[in-house]
Amino acid sequence: STEIGPALAWQSANFEFISENTTESIAFDIIARNSSSGRIDTLIRDSRDTNVSLTDIDAKLYPKIQLQVTLQSEDGLSTPLLKSWSVDYKPPPDLVVGNESILLNKDTVQTAEQLNLAIDSGNFGLSASDSFTIRISMAEKGQAPQQAQLMRVPGIPVDEFASYETVLSTENLRGRVTLNIEMDALNEIPEINESNNLTSSEFWVVDDTLSPDIRLTFDGREITHDEFVALSPRIMIEINDSGAVQFTDTSQVTIFLDNDKIPFGVGSGQAEFIPNSNPGDNELKATVLFTPTLTDGDHVLEIIAKDISDNSKYISNNFIVSEDFSLTNVMNYPNPFNRTTEFTYIITQPADGVKIKIFTVAGRLIMILDNLPTRVGFNQFLWDGRDRDGDRIANGVYLYKIIARQSSRQAEVIEKLVIMR
């Protein structure tokens, strides 16, 4: 036969044949290549059983086997007929790693900077894998790979994925570096296919050529484009950079609001530049505080940060200011729900208080959710589906009213939710 396997464990070999008379004979051998010595060994010889146990065969030493049959007839006038042969065995795992399995926190680092690495691997085989080793090696262009780490990691169940994380040192590396990942590097477990155990990626080790990073928050939170903000938001701009040189000059940060350049200072309409003085935070270089008084309508804030090596970063954010106080985009998800649901809503201006009242369709109040988030823009609140007695609410349709108030102004929205268990 052709080679059968690889196997995680051998179970049995089964034979079916036709023999017309006593002059005919049939005998079976089990042969296999020894993975350690490379030689072909006969593991079972001249068996005449139709069912042969293979449990004594070490699958690690003999991951693949072959069947061999000898058909004989003493009178030379007939021959036994082999109808079928088969092997039962426990199939092995199949560890898979690909080009998208290597996740680096940066594609460019400075010399001697640490690099965070995550390796995503899956098991596409038919059995769970035992623990195994991952070899990580790195090589500069034109140089032989050098082993950086040999990690022993837990096994992976069938049809599942696992992520393994580690930290790499780039000390003594320069230029373009190839990162090689080899699954089951010590070849400890048999696999269906070992050609998908290798993958590679590249990153650069350079002098400081990285652009700064800008984190922008409005009243303590990051916003997406076209979100609502307060009339006088507290805007904080954090400048981060992996370089060793601090930001000390206001010329390194430029701010535009609606195409008007914002001056630095501590007066009205000015932005305050604060160099980082915390030695425990090496990447935070400076903070800029800006509290403008905005008008009703659409606005755009643009920021340019430039480090001492002339590496620059530009970001812009479009946002909306509304003098009206209202609730929009009120919904709960999932809906229908089983155990929990999340209410989401947008407030066009900060509220003094937000609550939700839940009613039966007959109008009976069964729950009040108070002290909900009140900030301008997007908000969310998780409800466990219980009434004010702590009991789970029965299946059915309910109405809820969300109420937001700001001083003498109030906004209300009524929506419907469904509980289905």
Image: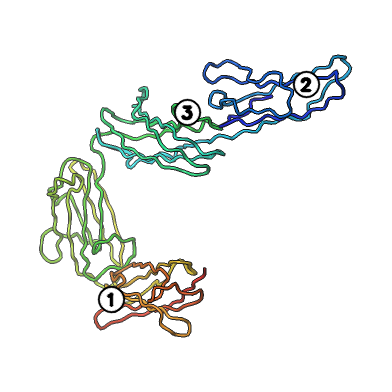
Q: Nearer the viewer, mark 2 or mark 1?
A: 2
SS label for mark 1 = strand
Foreground mark, 3 or 1, reads 3
Q: Name the disc covering residue 188, or none.
A: 3
- State left or right for residue 27 relative to residue 98: right
Q: How many marks?
A: 3
Question: Real-space Cα distance between discs 3 and 1?
Answer: 62 Å
Q: What label sits on residue 26 in the rendered view? A: 2
Residue at horizontal 21 percent and vertical 51 percent from the top: 239
* Quadrant occupied by the N terminus: top right
Residue 50 drawn at (x, y percent):
74, 28
Answer above or below: position of 316 versus 29.
Answer: below
Quadrant position of residue 116: top left
Residue type at mark 3: give it. Answer: Glu
- Front residue of 255/399: it is 399
Quarter of the image for residue 51 reads top right
